[in-house]
Image (spheres, rainbow, N blue to C red):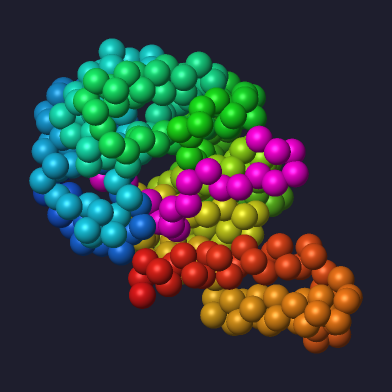
Amino acid sequence: MSHHQITERRRRLHRSELAVPGSLPSLFEKAAASSADYVFLDLEDAVAPDDKESARHNVIEALAGIDWRAAGKTISVRINGLDTHYMYRDLIDVVEQAGAHLDTVMIPKVGVPGDVYTVDALLSQMEQALGLRHRIGVEALIETALGMANVEAVAAASPRLEALHFGVADYAASCRARTMTIGGLNPDYPGDQWHSALSRLLVACRANGLRAIDGPFGDFSDPEGFMAGARRAAALGYDGKWAIHPSQVDLANEVFTPPAAEVGQARRVLGALDEAAAAGRGAAQLDGRMIDAASARMARNVVETADAIAAVTG
């Protein structure tokens, strides 16, 4: 990888990711019909131990039985962690029986690069054996102190890797943080106690061409709290946020969609710089402010995101 230009490894719209328990198949069609960019069917934390096998069966049926791509969804499955005996069956049964319909696998509680390699190696073997025509992507949940301590190495662990997610609930438990709500702020802390973790994960993503996704906000009766958390992540540069309740999907889409005024301004910046370049100048003035190549890079990010959203939503 060039040390100058790191491009995004896989471009996908990822403003909102709706979490759906694999043990509740009644929610699958609703998820497909929702306005979420991304859906993950969960075999891990949202599924009780006694329901793991039936949830796996439900998810395999749903992958083949619902046309997620026609519904405009990127579809993912969160497998159980590598520290459980459910994990190998999750991965093997899901991919062998429904891999053609699967976009990505989400690995929870990733602690070291070898966790990603384990899944990567199994996927490579199955893709060869099954003759799959597409490569299944991988996403890693960083939700332990170990994972955050190794986040830069994890981000570079595999060419399949597309995104890292910040799993704030398990992370809080791992750090023994005094937390009030999942993803909310603690009034005892002057500011955002998750800022350092969010920022470190973001930098690891951008250094390796990955998407950065903020995880859950637990109190779905508090839309203002959700929006505030989403805006904090968006301000840092995150691509999107989880929705653990359908009511959070549109909120996430709103926050991670650049406002029309911002897109218009970005297009003006690029236009002014084009004019300056034609006149032989590298920098320009716009509305009394200096703009240059760095301004162009920021503006281009906004315009590219807006164009990607328009391509999907029309």
Residue nearest the viewer, comparing 314 with 216: 314
The answer to whether residue 168 shows anywhere in this view is no
**Count of labels shown?**
0
Boundaries of the magenta span: 1-21
Q: Is residue 225 highlighted in magenta?
A: no
Q: Percent position (x, y) of residue 100?
A: 22, 38
Q: Percent position (x, y) of residue 237?
A: 62, 55
**Residue 232 in the image: above or below residue 218:** below
Q: Quadrant of the N terminus?
A: top right
**187 relative position to 131: left or right:** right
Residue nearest the viewer, comparing 257 with 231: 257
Q: Quadrant of the C terminus?
A: bottom left
Which residue corresponds to the image point at 40% horizontal and 29% vertical from the top-left? 107
Which residue corresponds to the image point at 22% horizontal and 41% vertical from the top-left? 101
Which secondary structure is most common in the magenta stretch? loop
Q: Is residue 3 highlighted in magenta?
A: yes
The answer to whether residue 102 shows anywhere in this view is yes
Which residue corresponds to the image point at 33% horizontal and 50% vertical from the top-left? 74
**Residue 313 in the image: above or below residue 220:** below
Residue nearest the viewer, comparing 145 with 267: 267
Q: Percent position (x, y) of residue 60?
A: 15, 35
